[in-house]
Image (cartoon, rainbow, N blue to C red):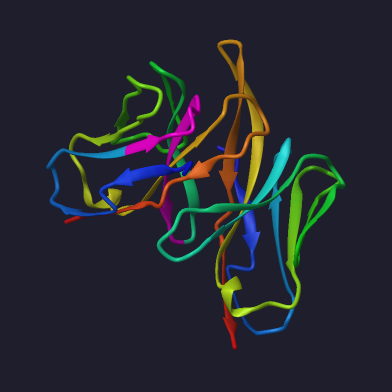
Amino acid sequence: EAQVTQNPRYLITVTGKKLTVTCSQNMNHEYMSWYRQDPGLGLRQIYYSMNVEVTDKGDVPEGYKVSRKEKRNFPLILESPSPNQTSLYFCASSTSGGNNEQFFGPGTRLTVL
Amino acid sequence: GQQLNQSPQSMFIQEGEDVSMNCTSSSIFNTWLWYKQDPGEGPVLLIALYKAGELTSNGRLTAQFGITRKDSFLNISASIPSDVGIYFCAGQAIFNAGGTSYGKLTFGQGTILTVHP
């Protein structure tokens, strides 16, 4: 089944404790992206990757890092999480090129205490 | 970055009623998309619109790409309980980087739809 998977689905952590949220897709997509969803703000892009080893900042990159060592994986790293990073996070992937549908993962709900 | 204004923020309707929601932007987009998010899930694409003025239907859903390319609406006819969820509009702009083009999505704030049986 073609899908985007994220782990963990739920995470409660404390300020300053490094964490990684994994994202994997099995559709051989070149483009992958991370979003955060907050009430009243919709989804905002954090980082995106055009292909392996090619990443760039989205609209809200502060406090986040990403890497793209393999085509299928695009982990999101929070080196020192803070409470304002409490949010619902979505990974998405699509084929390269314009006018392409992005497929979203099921989401990771993160709480930073 | 670009911003979309989506309205209404929430709707409470009776089963069988029609629903209408819209999005406006100060910028033009190449594509307008409408997504639905069910509780505990990621957004799923409902309708994609590629041309200014385009009117597209998908079952009980109808969406239009505004002539100015700065707005779009989504209508749901004869609502049913499973229509409950959050609906997002998204404008897609095409960017070119390193010889490759890709689409960047900008999302509206979402419309929370509640349908009473």
Image quadrant in which the N terminus of chain B is located: top right
Q: How many marks?
A: 0
Q: Is residue A37 magenta?
A: yes
- Residue toward you, B64 or A105: A105
- Based on the picture, tell me whether residue A62 belongs to the magenta stretch: no
Residue A7: x and y, percent?
A: 28, 45
Per the rendered image, the range of residues in magenta is A23-39
Residue at image coords 50%, 24%: A30
> Percent position (x, y) of residue A56?
43, 23
Residue A55, position as x, y percentages in the image: 41, 22
Q: Locate residue A96: give its quadrant.
A: top right
Q: What secondary structure prevails in the magenta region?
A: strand
Residue farthest along the top direction in this orientation = B99
Up the image or down, B73 lies above or below A79; here it is below
Determine whether A108 is above or below B111 in the image.
Answer: above
A77 vs A70, left or right, is left
Q: Nearer the viewer, residue A27 or A98?
A: A27
At x 77%, y 40%, the residue is B50
Question: What is the quadrant of the C terminus of chain B in the image?
Answer: bottom right
Q: Position of residue B22 (x, y in %)?
A: 71, 60
Please give left or right for residue B21 compared with residue A57 in the image.
right
Residue in the picture at 66% in, 33% down: B93
Left or right: residue B106 versus residue A5 is right
Q: Please, which residue is most extreme toward the front here?
A: A1
User: Looking at this view, is A39 or B26 the one in front?
Assistant: A39
Q: Is residue B83 left or right of residue B57?
A: left
Would you place residue B7 above or below residue B97 in this image?
below
